[in-house]
Image (cartoon, rainbow, N blue to C red):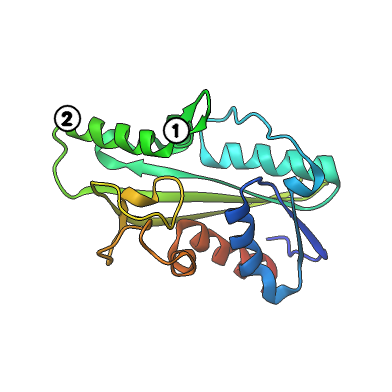
Amino acid sequence: MTRKFGDKTLLVASHNAGKIEEIAALLEPFGVSIKSNIDFDLPEPEETETTFVGNARIKAHAASQATGLPALSDDSGIEVDALGGAPGVYTADWAETENGRDFPMAMTRTWNELDAINAPSPRTARFKSTLVLAWPDGHDEVFDGKIEGQVVWPMRGKQGHGYDPIFMADGYDITMGEMDRWEKNKISHRADALKKLVAACFD
């Protein structure tokens, strides 16, 4: 039996302002007060799992235990079929440098690896998101979302974040980096997972 959300405050276990804003907008109709890791000065826990759900669980439970609030976390990434699903759970790792994350570098690496194996077109891929809603008593609910598409080159658009400038969703002729942010938020992998969460725990 899915646990319903009956609290007044939800902690979004993230330091990503765009992600926090996206979740807050979707939950606005339910009158939930949204807090984030930033409000509590929480550190980023080490993501030691090899799956989206594993890492999302680490983040949600760490934040919930630290604050005594229900916490929602997301772990997401891009899976490129010709690369065997890589970078997948290591999507952000591909962008890591000594000076922070460099996503143009990560996108270039992705395309170069596809070229190196002469991957045929379309170079199909998907964005995946796993949401974990955790309570202080250790209970959690898990919701998965995805959006199918392909990776394209060159990078296009400055609207999105991460790998958005090289991802074109099925049915579109622009990348997610060229898409209006609120339009993207309606169709994204995170929106897909959030709709399932809302239907199960809020409606």
Q: Does residue 102 appear left or right of residue 61 in this picture?
A: left
Q: Residue 178's x, y, as percent?
A: 35, 60
Q: Residue 130's x, y, as percent?
A: 54, 49
On the image, numbered disc 2 is attached to which residue?
117
Could you tell me which residue is drawn at 46 percent across and 57 percent down? 189
Comparing 30 with 134, the one in front is 30
Q: Quadrant of the C terminus?
A: bottom right
| Kind of residue at disc 1 | Ala
Comparing 185 with 98, the one in front is 98
Comparing 97 with 50, the one in front is 97
Q: Does residue 88 appear left or right of residue 83 in this picture?
A: right
Q: Distance between the residues labelled 2 and 1?
A: 21 Å
Label 1, residues with CA under 10 Å away: few <14, some 14-19, many ≥20 = some
For the view shown, which residue lies furthest in the right direction? Answer: 68
Could you tell me which residue is drawn at 68 percent across and 72 percent down? 28
Q: Residue 98's x, y, as percent?
A: 52, 23
Q: Residue 23 carries which label?
A: none
Q: Where is 178 relative to 186, above or below?
A: above
Q: Is mark 1 on a helix, strand or loop?
A: helix
Q: Residue 43's x, y, as percent?
A: 73, 34
Q: Where is 175 relative to 55, above or below?
A: below
| Kind of residue at disc 2 | Ile
Q: Which of marks 2 and 1 is in front?
A: 1
Label 2, residues with CA under 10 Å away: few <14, some 14-19, many ≥20 = few
Could you tell me which residue is drawn at 23 percent across and 46 percent down? 153
Q: Disc 2 or 1, which lies upstream in sequence?
A: 1
On the image, numbered disc 1 is attached to which residue?
95
